[in-house]
Image (tube, rainbow, N blue to C red):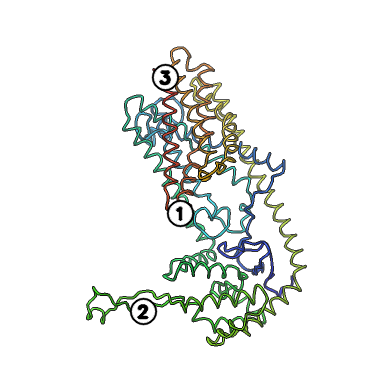
Amino acid sequence: MSDDSPYYRYSSSASLPADQNNTNSGESSLIVLSDDLPPVVQKRKEEEAKPQSSSGIWMTIVALSIFSMLGNAFRVFLENLFGQSCETQTPTWLYRLSFKWNVCFTSSQTALFIDLPVNMIGSFVMGLFQPCQDIGLQSSVPIAFLKTKHWFQTSQVVHIAIRTGFCGSLTTFSSWNTSMLALMTNEQIVAALFGYIIGAYLSVSSLKLGQQTSIGLHRFVNPYLAKAEDLQYSSQHSPINQKVLHELYRKNRLLPDFERRYLDGLLSKQELQWVKQRVTALDALDQWKQTTHDHRTQPYRLVPSRSSNVSSSSFSNNPPLRPSPSKLMEQKLLTLQQIEHQIIVEREDPSENVLRVAREHGWDVDALKQWAEHAIEASNDEAVAEDQRKQKEATSSSRSATKKTMIVLWAHALLVVCLLTYFGYSSVFDDSTFYPSLLLSTILAPLGTLLRWWLSRFNGNLKGGWSWFPIGTFAANISASLVSALFNGMLIRYNNYIPTTSFTSISLRAIAIGFTGCLSTVSTFVTEYDKLNKTFPQHGKAAYYVIASLLTACFLGLAVYVPLIS
């Protein structure tokens, strides 16, 4: 593309700012493509699930395994740092560090259970790494707190590894439930009840805190998207009829990106200056903007509202105002959007009735036609060259992102190898069972994570009115809770027969910590609660899911745990 042309007009893959993307792949979008401009828009990634190649599946499995080992190791370290080492008084560096920093505040004997800090930290990280669409932003950027064109945005394998592998393994539903079962069997039912409530509430709050942190960083690093999102928010919350607002938004989002942002005043000064220097027909578009400005920027008006409970004196001095969404004004807005859509997108002349309305209000339709003809002519001349350039850039960007993703995976794999070596070395020269259990649990962690990842495919597969229920995550948490209750009960029952330093005892603890701890998850659990709460705000489905999960894990866990310790 020549330097004199600021855009490529009709692109099926281009996106609008703030993720106001076309729902149909063939609809047009116009974007500024100058390399010397800041990144304003992010290309929309296809949401439809595509079959992965065998190499892609294996890379995902490897990434999940690596990050699950890291998540499990960090969980054990943090559990001991914040309380467990103080209870067991295991002579490790974590025990000495806990006393030095005085950070032992969790206990297996109180509602502040051992896994509370890791569940909060994992939920916070999960919220931080949420896609824009999951935290209420209009953009389709996978990682909200990064720039839209950051190379890490395309590392989908690492995204899955962080959310499912690391966060899912750092948090644990099964150990949380087992701690509450232990409280109940010690006749601390009230403490167990508060443990369930505190665990759920603080995990959800941590997720929300992570999401809000991500939103704040997103607005800081992507100011152009933030401005577009503010405009969309203000339009959605204006007093005008919501049905009309939806229709206006539907039509407006179908406009090419450049025209939409120019007419709405969303271009930065740098962009505006750049465009004016290169686009000869911009005066025509500006003429259309000026003649339609009043109807575009004043979708409703405030008029005095006389009420029976307001005195005449107070009304005359400070009359109350109320929105007056006039049907005629709404129709003007719809007509304005219809003209822009027909001329710019559909490339056809409006009907005579529509043109008559435009003439009555002084809208310069000829100027809009002049702009459309210039833009279409320019795009037709440059489409082929631009397609080739974009394809070349996409290939180069993909190779670069893949290379950086592999570097990230290799770096984390090296970290895992170092941790396993350290655990193995400490197991040989340390008399305690801490490091042998940690080594074996870290090795078993990928099995639980991969099984949970496989079960997640069943989410939404229930028939009838239960399709909303995330049955895959529910099955993972409940099955892990049962296995954890079984193995912890066996450790208590056969404590006098199995030495704590024996391989059998170490294996049972490692399975309960590594396999079941990574099979269950709190970060995904609270994320699904958050999504259900946003999707069905008028129903209690989010609460039903949480209560069903906790009660099922509790009662089935008691059925397994109590007979073993009796």
Considering the image in quadrants, where does the C terminus appear?
A: top left
Query: Amino acid type of disc 2?
Result: Val
From the top left corner, tell me how far across and down residue 195 is, in percent: 36, 35
* Residue 359, picture quadrant: bottom right
Mark positioned earlier in the residue sequence (1 or 2)? 1
Q: Is residue 48 left or right of residue 85?
A: right
Between marks 3 and 2, how big is the CA–CA gap? 73 Å
Mark positioned earlier in the residue sequence (1 or 3)? 1
Residue located 35% across and 32% down the image: 192
Residue located 75% across and 73% down the image: 380
Residue located 57% across and 61% down the image: 19
Crowding around mark 1 (Cα neighbors within 10 Å: few <14, some 14 to 19, many 20+) is some
Q: State whether residue 62 is above or below residue 532.
A: above
Considering the image in quadrants, where does the N terminus appear?
A: bottom right
In the rendering, which numbered label is found on residue 212?
1
From the top left corner, tell me how far across and down residue 30 is, in percent: 65, 69
In the rendering, which numbered label is found on residue 563?
3
Give whichever of 456, 34 is nearer the camera: 456
- Whether residue 326 is visible here, answered yes or no, is yes
What residue would you read off at disc 2?
303
